[in-house]
Amino acid sequence: MNQHTPPAQVWPTLRARDARALIDFYVSAFGFTETVVYTGDDGGVAHAELAWPPGGGIMMGQERDEPGNAWSLSPGTFGGYVVTRDAAHTDEVWARAVAAGAKPVAEPYDTDYGSHDCTLLDPEGNHWQFGTYPGHPTG
């Protein structure tokens, strides 16, 4: 079996009021792939990883009251930009997400810096922007 660790990446994290429902939404509406879900003794999602097919992903878990826990993100406070393969992929994510119940914020548009973007809110109020801008070259 040839397994390898993926190259270093940024994996944004968030907490959810209903993590299982939000995972299902991200898979069906946005196109993430469910990689792993660990449940706690209470059956809630303790940790989940969702891969973004072109690369990277997100980590998430169920909101829980843990005194002394340094992880204090509240559900609905996340915002992220996800790079799509091309303009058609941005449009595809937009259409699928709106059909699945995402709240439209900005329908697909072209920016003055050459990106094709759209902006949505998921069912818990997290802010998502999808677009073709991969970031400025670094070298």
Image: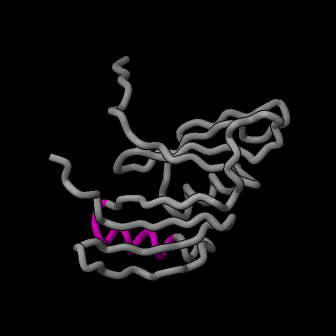
Question: Residue 87 colored magenta?
Answer: yes
Report the residue at 45% width, 82% height from top. Answer: 107
Figure colour scheme: one colour
Q: Position of residue 52 (x, y in %)?
A: 43, 50
Report the residue at 37% width, 17% height from top. Answer: 1
Q: Nearer the viewer, residue 139 or 20?
A: 139
Report the residue at 64% width, 60% height from top. Answer: 77
Q: Is residue 55 above or below residue 130?
A: above
Q: Nearer the viewer, residue 31 or 76?
A: 76
Q: How many marks?
A: 0
Furthest residue toward left: 139
Give the side of residue 68 with respect to residue 15, left or right.
Answer: right
Question: Residue 82 colored magenta?
Answer: no
Picture quarter containing residue 6? top left
Q: Is residue 65 above or below residue 90?
A: above
The range drawn in magenta is 85-96
Q: Nearer the viewer, residue 34 or 67?
A: 67
Give the side of residue 6 with respect to residue 48, left or right.
Answer: left
Report the residue at 68% width, 40% height from top. Answer: 71
Magenta part mainly helix, strand or loop? helix
Give the side of residue 6 with respect to residue 59, left or right.
Answer: left
Q: Nearer the viewer, residue 62 or 33?
A: 62
Q: Position of residue 16 (x, y in %)?
A: 70, 53
Picture quarter containing residue 75? bottom right
Give the side of residue 38 with respect to residue 49, left or right.
Answer: right
Q: Position of residue 50 (x, y in %)?
A: 53, 45
Q: Is residue 50 above or below residue 114?
A: above
